[in-house]
Amino acid sequence: MKNFLIILIFLFFILSSVARAGSLQVVVSIKPIHSIVSCIMQGIGTPALLVKGASSPHEYSLRISEAMMLENADIIFWLGAEMESFLVKPLHSLNKQSNVVTLSHSPDLHRILLRDNHSHFHDSEADDLHLWLNPLNVQYIAHVIAMELIKKDPRNKIIYEKNEEEFKNQLSQLDKELHSILQPVEKKKIIVFHEAYRYFASHYNLSIVTFPMSHSVFMGAASLRNIRSKIISDKISCLFYGPEFDSKIIRSITNDTGVMSAILDPEGMLIAEGPELYFQLMRSMSNSIAKNCS
């Protein structure tokens, strides 16, 4: 009996090693999507992330090691050229185009068009690809991810489906929670400096005024006066800026206006990567808006 148990334990470790060795090589472009893929892959494997830390996909340059990672990947999840322009050429040159999953191509997604002055490709018909800021879009994205993983790894179909169902339940609870948090500030006017928030604003009935500008472009006196004038004339309640902006510039805008200001992090730059990132990102944004606009 003792020998039999030893053999069973030995076989268990052997089979576990084989399963790990044979797991999918999954690469994901940005943190919010990586978080969703991580949730769907829990118990099976961990996807690799390209744009890490506080890096921006709009300014990212692919390393040689990451190019090799793409070539060896079984599946590559990205949103599309408007979000991850640094991936357009590398993905086009891959030998196996069937391994690339462009999540923005899902027909069920709720879409918002970019304004002319924000599009990285200057295309007035380009979609805004900050799709994850609407939980309904995330529900569709999670399903596409699960189906693609099952195609490549059918032996783990039950686990992927279970993870998708659990993720959708958590997503539904999160959405209800955020509606409750944000409902008291629905009528408050908010200023932001990036078009990213329109999915979030539309879904949670927020009134957002956007002044599209880059942190890397000098903000002249005229621009500062225009924003301050808008704050006063429109009775703006609060102002939010990304982690990449200089807080001194923000203070020069809000000084003497009585308007509260704080960081919003829609891409999760300041949050550790992993399955919890998406939920932390959405809660952090909602709590910050509710706190500073009340």
Image (cartoon, grey):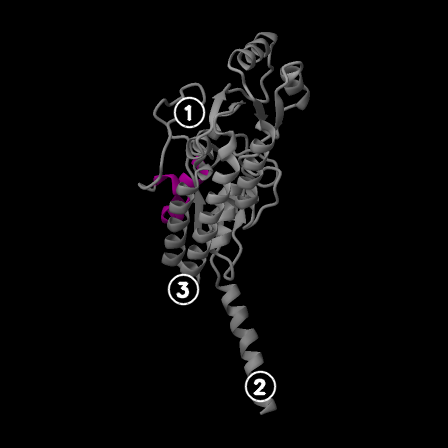
Residue under pointer 1: 121
Q: Earlier in the sequence, mark 3 or mark 1?
A: 1
The quarter of the image holding the N terminus is: bottom right
Disc 2/disc 1 C-alpha distance (Å)? 63 Å
> Residue 55: which quarter of the image?
top right
The magenta segment is 88-105
Residue 252 located left or right of residue 137 = right
Residue drawn at x 58%, y 80% as measured from the top left? 9
**Quarter the C terminus occupies:** top right
Callout 3, which amino acid? Ile
In the rendered structure, which disc, 2 or 1, sits on the residue that comes first in sequence?
2
State the mark number for residue 76: none
> Looking at the picture, how far across and down is residue 22, in whole percent?
48, 64
SS class, disc 1: loop
Residue for badge 2 = 5
> Is disc 1 surrounded by few (<14), some (14 to 19) or many (20+) residues within 10 Å?
few
Which residue does the image show at 56% across and 36% down from the upper left?
285
Vertical order, 13 against 113 (above or below) = below
Q: Which residue is mark 3?
A: 158
Indicate whether 9 appears above or below 237.
Answer: below
